[in-house]
Amino acid sequence: NAGVTQTPKFQVLKTGQSMTLQCAQDMNHEYMSWYRQDPGMGLRLIHYSVGAGITDQGEVPNGYNVSRSTTEDFPLRLLSAAPSQTSVYFCASSPGMNTEAFFGQGTRLTVV
Amino acid sequence: DQQVKQNSPSLSVQEGRISILNCDYTNSMFDYFLWYKKYPAEGPTFLISISSIKDKNEDGRFTVFLNKSAKHLSLHIVPSQPGDSAVYFCAASALREYGNKLVFGAGTILRVKS
């Protein structure tokens, strides 16, 4: 039972490069989301999805794109990486409203 | 403007004693509260939750208390064990908010000394 799987675990990018962080879940959850964790700030919501084909912005969406073509996958795209996007990124899924979210192991991204 | 605040960055407790982690919130629309535990280099794992229609929820050694009038919740761990040493995040969501969006506090580092 894999749960929520994120790849890669670590990534170093140069300023201006683009990349996609992958997230897949095998629990058939409708809701998926992306958070970033920065020191002293907890986790902040970047984008979320309530089902295939439906996405919306969270608290800190600038510089990121998402799409949800299947229930299982929710990739996060960095369009043009900036040092301010250095962070740990977590993908999560949940079965519905007011339920616990299940998190992946995270991707540590450094932008130089 | 942080809607969920954990004012204690760290807490140190002796093994076997009680650990009390606190969390305050400002948004009166929040009606579902969760505690997550996080070890280094791992994702947060769900610990316990409470709905605003309750004021207490227990699960083994973990109890969460909710005081809606004070907009305050706390997590009690009794007895504390060395394996409980981790970062604890308080989170909140609002049923009326579309998408099960969680708002997190900054976290409290708990160290349980043996």
Image: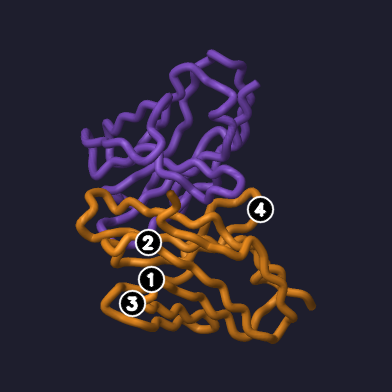
Chain colours: A purple, B orange
- For residue B110, what is the image quadrant? bottom right
Label 3 vs 2, first from the N-terminus: 2
- For residue A73, what is the image quadrant? top left
Please report the residue visible at 77 percent of the width from the left and 75 percent of the height from the top.
B113
Q: Is residue B48 left or right of residue B78?
A: left
Determine whether the residue tagged by mark 1 lies in a helix, strand or loop: loop
Label 2 vs 1, first from the N-terminus: 2
Q: Marks 1 and 3, how far apart in space?
A: 6 Å
Q: Marks 4 and 3, how far apart in space?
A: 35 Å
A89 is higher (above) or lower (below) than B62: above
Q: Are marks 2 and 1 in contact (CB under 8 Å)?
A: yes
Q: Marks 2 and 1, how far apart in space?
A: 7 Å
Any mark on residue B69, and which?
Answer: 3
Q: Nearer the viewer, residue A68 or B20?
A: B20
Which three-letter amino acid code belongs to the residue tagged 2? Answer: Thr
Residue on which disc 2 sits: B26
Q: Marks 4 and 1, how far apart in space?
A: 29 Å
The quadrant in which the N terminus of chain A is found is bottom left
Residue on which disc 4 sits: B40
Residue on which disc 1 sits: B71
Where is residue B78? Give x, y as percent. 59, 85
How packed is label 3: few (under 14 Cα within 10 Å), some, or many (20 or more)? Answer: few
Determine whether the residue tagged by mark 2 lies in a helix, strand or loop: loop
Q: Marks 3 and 2, how far apart in space?
A: 11 Å
Label 4 vs 3, first from the N-terminus: 4
